Image (spheres, helix red, strand yellow):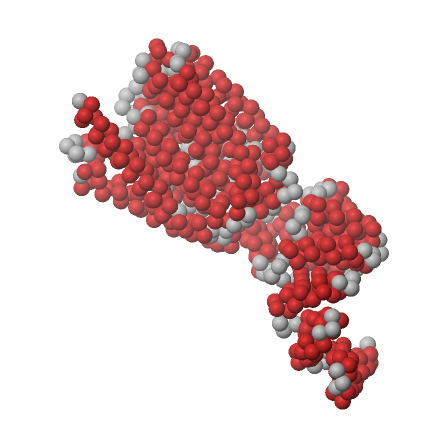
Amino acid sequence: MSSIAAPQARSGAVRAVALGAFLVVAILAAYAASLRGEFLWDDDLHITANPTIIGPLGLTEIWTTARANYFPLVLTNFWVQHALWGLNPLGYHLVTLACHALAALLLWRVLVQLRVPGAWFGAALWALHPVQVESVAWICELKNTQSAVFFLAAIGCYVRWLNSGSGERERVDRPPLAHARSYALALVCALLAILSKPSTVMLPVVLALCVWWQHGRLTWRDLGALVPFFVFSAVAAAWTIWEQRVNSGAAGAEWAQTWPERFAIAGRVVWFYLGKLAWPADLIFIYPRWQIDTAQPLAFAPLVAMLAVVGGLWWWRASALRPVFIAAIYFGALLFPVLGFFSVFFFRYSFVGDHFQYLASMGPLALAGAGLTVGLERMSPAGGWAYNPRGIVPVGVLVVLGVMTWRESGQYLNKEALWRTTLARNPDAFMAWANLGDTLAQQGRQHEAILAFRRGLQLRPDDPPVHNDLGCALVMIGQPQAAIPILERALQLKPGYAEVHNNLGNALSRVGRADEAISHYEQALKFKPDHAEALDNLGCELVGRGRLPEAIARFEEAIRLVPNSVKFYRDLGTVLTRSGRLTEAIVQFAEVARLEPAMPAAHAILGNALAQAGRWDEALPHLQTALSLAPADADLHGNVGVALATLGKLPEAVVAFRHAIRLRPEFADAHGNLAQILRSLGKNLEAAEHYDEAERLRQQASRRR
């Protein structure tokens, strides 16, 4: 018998590997479009502008301060990725997608452990369903995909521990060391899942469901084994509730629903998510935010219907509906943190979001996979759907879902595409208008941004951030006077808003109200001491007042906070030059050239500083580099000419000055410098012509002044 079993085991292993590989390839194909995507909304808070990722903070702050938010293990992952490939979004997309693929494989194996029919098909349905696109294509939702890996690993280890007695429950009271290791691994994976995303706090409920599914009942011993998991979850839940209110700001009128309203919302949320699983059409990044009127009895209809279904399933829990009951309880348990009973910041925009049901959707989709598999097998008992023409149904379903997922991924390619797609499907999405305006402003399309901000304010006229963004955009297009009342309104709506104080300072500075500008920059720093931009702006204003030592201190602090800002280094270098500290200024300008090696101005400013310090042999290469990057710049040709002449390279200097004059015939200094060199070379007649031209141009310029 062993000679027969061995080939069968090898055949089963080969088939499992083939199915796993096919599932991974299908996932890669379905989400391929998302790999070209850029960083999106909130990715700046998590990665591109997060000081714990890009510096100057790091792992210590991630694990020991509130900057970790509530997913330190994900931020650690981002920290490692940034160390490996910087801010190239492709690497982040690949890691997120790899976690999703690994989660799909783990889900398949867990379903196999639980003896769920059609385990592979159920996992594939979940992995390829379009509602997962938001979690996979949006980089910061690595929180979902990474936590899912540990969540499923914990379930797998726990089920292995449950089965360690070969199905004899009496033998698991004191499992041997190898089996105890499975329990310990489950506990470790549970902790890692919570550290990745606290929505996994419902894991103990899922483990209890696994026990119930396996053995049909729960004993006190079963509950005792789950106590450590419940302790982890209770601590994480308490922390998350506090964090959402205090750190994320989920407090105020937008989260002040009454308990009847919250129950009405919960009922509607459950049916909404089930509807999107059954018919994944019109998926939207920001769904309309429902208006709940509890004075209307129909507002509670979804809740009543949900309770009636759950009650019926409980009544028939020992019947053929037992799998449906288990899937329903799993679905409700995993959705519980986002049903509306707890304040979540995202609820400011909508009570639902596709990424909220990433884990919860495993239950209904696994049930759908099992139901279709069993149904097809009953129609073709001799072979099963995999060997029957009816197998086209599951394959067809997966192909359709995969194509829908591939198409849906297209809206996540960049911020503008995401917001415009959202607005096409939900024109009243205030947040989408605000973020579209912000995206356009970052692209320098300020006039378009202003239109988007004004549309956002029509939908929500009392929103301080959009007033701030609109005011900032008006300053950028040269309308600071128009920006001032808008920014002042933002401060009325939200006193102590550091960003508004900073932008109002900018507006006041541009209309000549320097003292008021300084006051607002100082207010910004009072409310947000690490506001690097306000520090730099204050420094610039202090320079204008001649308070150079104070300005230098502000610029140095700004650089400490944001060590990769070209503007901060340039501003510090400029004021150090004015203070006569040229050697220190050169160090700052060298950083400018290092950070922007392809910018001609970066090399030019360093070259000019070196020349001013008399270090001509060092200055010339930088000036020539700048010239190679901007060959049509007459001033650069002139500066290179001066450097060449100073180093005694007169023929080359002549060529440089001639280029400068050809590009700008009225360049008086170039005529004068060329005249001096020509005279030293004995070309007195030509030198005289350039002397005369230089003098004529200078007199002409003097008369204009």
Q: Is residue 288 left or right of residue 700?
A: left
Residue that sits furthest to the left in the current view: 382
Is 79 located above or below residue 200 in the figure?
below
Q: Where is residue 673 shown, x and y percent of the image?
A: 76, 78
Q: Is residue 576 left or right of residue 92?
A: right
Residue that sits furthest to the right in the current view: 546
Give 135 or 449, whichever is nearer the viewer. Answer: 135
Q: Residue at x 48, y 21 (%)?
A: 229
Is 530 located above or below residue 155 in the figure?
below
Give 228 or 560, whichever is nearer the viewer. Answer: 560
Q: Residue at x 83, y 56 (%)?
A: 579
Q: Where is residue 3 shown, x and y percent of the image?
A: 19, 25
Q: Is residue 110 left or right of residue 189?
A: left
Give 603 or 233, whichever is nearer the viewer. Answer: 603
Q: Where is residue 142 shown, x and y percent of the image?
A: 49, 39
Can residue 179 be seen at all in this image of the molecule?
Answer: yes
Can residue 372 be seen at all in this image of the molecule?
Answer: no
Q: Quadrant of residue 679?
A: bottom right
Q: Residue at x 80, y 80 (%)?
A: 698
Q: Is residue 385 left or right of residue 40?
A: left
Split into 4 quadrants, where in the image is the C terminus?
Answer: bottom right
Count of numbered circles on the image: 0
Q: Where is residue 148 shown, x and y percent of the image?
A: 44, 33
Split into 4 quadrants, where in the image is the N terminus?
Answer: top left
Q: Residue at x 45, y 52 (%)?
A: 36
